[in-house]
């Protein structure tokens, strides 16, 4: 597979992103894996790399953007050191999810959908983790945590710090 020139892109990320695409054979059907690898290398998938990926895979920028924005696991901005994904589905909400969210916001000093000013925590909403009978549930740094109670949130957050 020949290398593609990316000289027209004014980005410090052009070379590593082009290498990731090349490692996947510049195949459009590898887009999800390429995005995972880019996020693994850069910590997120910045908007500036979408045209680079699009060119390498012979896709439109809109097609790449659509995939990045459709899947909630791709982050377009840097995330905190710890990512807390709290379930907002009905079962978890009826089990006290709103109180857990409020406790998390207070304990981390950030709002749902944002990253704390100190860069330690990102709070995200997800809609069902499959732990419905054990709600409220969350993914904390990719690990499932069930039956979270508001009074336990401070200890949970301190454990991460």
Image (cartoon, grey):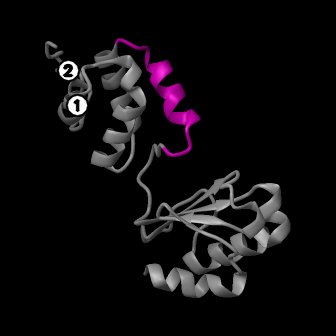
Residue 94: percent from left, percent from top: 85, 66
Give yes or no for contact between labels 2 and 1 (Cβ–Cβ under 8 Å).
Answer: yes
Report whether 3 appears left or right of 111: left
Residue 135 shows in the view: no
Q: Please name the residue shown 21% across and 28% down the image.
A: 23
Q: Please name the residue shown 56% across and 59% down the image.
A: 114
In the foreground, 154 or 128: 128
Majority secondary structure in the magenta region: helix
Q: Residue 65: say if magenta.
A: yes
Q: Residue 66: say if magenta.
A: yes
Q: Residues within 10 Å of mark 1 (few under 14, many from 20)?
A: many
Q: Residues within 10 Å of mark 2 (few under 14, many from 20)?
A: some
Residue 146 shows in the view: yes
Q: Please name the residue shown 70% across and 70% down the image.
A: 101
User: Where, by quadrant of the figure, is residue 31 drawn?
Assistant: top left
Residue that extends furthest to the left in the rendered view of this protein: 2
In the foreground, 48 or 152: 152
The residue stretch that appears in magenta? 58-73
Which element carries disc 2, helix, strand or loop? loop
Report whether 72 appears left or right of 148: left
Residue 140: percent from left, percent from top: 52, 67
Q: Is residue 154 above or below residue 24?
A: below
User: Where, by quadrant of the figure, is residue 161 drawn?
Assistant: bottom left
Q: Which mark is residue 129?
A: none
Residue 63: percent from left, percent from top: 49, 19
Identify the residue position indicated by label 1 in the image. 14
Residues under labels 2 and 1: Cα distance?
A: 7 Å
Identify the residue position indicated by label 2 in the image. 6
In the foreground, 24 or 47: 24
């Amino acid at each position: 597979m020949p290398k593609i020139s990316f000289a027209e892109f004014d980005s410090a990320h052009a070379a590593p992103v082009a290498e990731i695409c090349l490692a996947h054979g510049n195949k459009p059907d590898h887009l999800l894996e390429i995005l995972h690898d880019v996020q693994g290398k850069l910590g997120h998938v910045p908007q500036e790399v979408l045209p680079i990926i699009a060119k390498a895979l012979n896709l439109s920028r809109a097609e790449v953007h659509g995939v990045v924005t459709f899947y909630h696991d791709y982050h377009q901005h840097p995330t905190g050191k710890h990512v807390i994904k709290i379930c907002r589905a009905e079962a978890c909400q009826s089990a006290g999810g709103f109180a857990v969210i409020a406790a998390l916001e207070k304990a981390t000093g950030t709002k749902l959908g944002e990253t704390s000013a100190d860069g330690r925590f990102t709070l995200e909403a997800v809609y069902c983790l499959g732990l419905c009978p054990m709600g409220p549930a969350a993914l904390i740094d990719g690990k499932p945590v069930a039956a979270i109670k508001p009074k336990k949130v401070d200890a949970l957050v301190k454990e991460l710090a």
